[in-house]
Amino acid sequence: MPSWKEIKSRIKSVKNTGKITKAMELISTVKMKKAQESVLFARPFSLAAVKVLRSTLHESDVFSEFTKINATSDRELIIVVASQKGLCWWYNTNVFKKVVEYIRTDHDETRSYDYISIWKRARDFILRTGQNLIMDFSDEIKDPLTTAESRRLVRFILNEWKTGKYQDITLIYNHYISAITQIPVAYKFFPLDKDYMISFLDEMIGKSQEKVIEWEAYTIEPNPECIVDAVLPMVFDLMFHEKLLEAKASEHAARMVAMKNAKDSANKKVAALTLSYNKARQASITKEVSEIVSWVESMKDI
């Protein structure tokens, strides 16, 4: 059994660990709320974009560049979003399991895959499993996220799609539902689903804005194609940025829960060690008292 001095040293060490995990929990909570609030800033643009796009949906060829598959080979590009750092519990594991599940459930055995990694844990996973990593954005995309950073990534993805190398471009990330619930999702970014894009913009606007939206007919000059060519890349920027914000909110939520559990475990450990310390200290005092009494009794005989 360790001495009471050793137990006291351990109590001090565990208390320090508890303070660190509590601080990390608070930091993750703040970052998670900021990621949630950032989504609301896109509402004015979403309102304007959805009004323009609704007026051009009747044009059959406007979205053809993004809705039709022009690939010359049976390849798919998968974008994996994980975390930059650790200590976020099951967050990365769920993403990696989703990647493996997505590949296994693809019944086309002839299909090959290329990968883009966002943040270091995704890069490490792709390289560790021997996959073909064509681009890594671990160091380019920071936290907190900015639209400029996600825009560079979207432009790279658009260029890859326009080359005709890929039949599909899929984003795998953790979808934020609540602070304790996040689910891994495989979202098909290309080919484009027009209905999903409009529903996404409607959701970004929010139900509170529905009454103030007036769907008027636009007279578009010079033509709908030019307008959509200008608007669509910005909508893609918004869509992808929102997915990254959800992934970041999920990461911070997972880290917040992990650090809370670590803090609670540290507190329980301190309580258990304190009890052991008191017992060891009491035993030491009892032993010292017994030795003094024995010494006094032995002196009486002399």
Image (cartoon, rainbow, N blue to C red):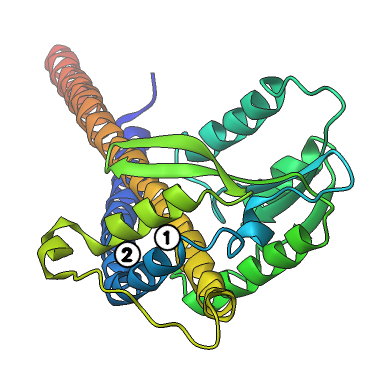
Q: Residue furthest bottom?
A: 222
Q: Identify the image quadrant of the C terminus.
A: top left
Residue 119 percent coordinates (x, y): 61, 57
Splitting the image into 4 quarters, where does residue 93 fall? top right
Alpha carbon separation for disc pair 2 and 1: 6 Å
Q: Would residue 229 appear left or right of 128 to someone viewing this image? A: left
Mark 1 is surrounded, within 10 Å at the Cα level, by few (under 14), some (14 to 19) or many (20 or more) other residues, namely: many
Query: Visible in this render: residue 247?
Result: no
Residue 173 place in picture, x, y as percent: 52, 44
Q: Residue at x 24, y 23 (%)?
A: 276
Q: Are marks 2 and 1 in contact (CB under 8 Å)?
A: yes
Quadrant where the N terminus sits is top left
Q: Which residue is mark 2?
A: 39
Q: Earlier in the sequence, mark 2 or mark 1?
A: 2
At x 31%, y 74%, the residue is 217
Looking at this view, is 23 or 258 the one in front?
Answer: 258
Q: Position of residue 262 (x, y in %)?
A: 34, 38
Q: Provide the residue designation for mark 1.
A: 242
- Above or below residue 89? Residue 31 is below
* Secondary structure found at label 1: helix
In the image: residue 237, left or right of residue 37: right
Badge 1 amino acid: Glu
- Which amino acid does the dot numbered 2 rest on? Val
40, 37: nearer the viewer:
40
| Structural crowding at the residue carrying mark 2, measured as other residues with C-alpha within 10 Å and reported as few (<14), some (14–19) or many (≥20) | some
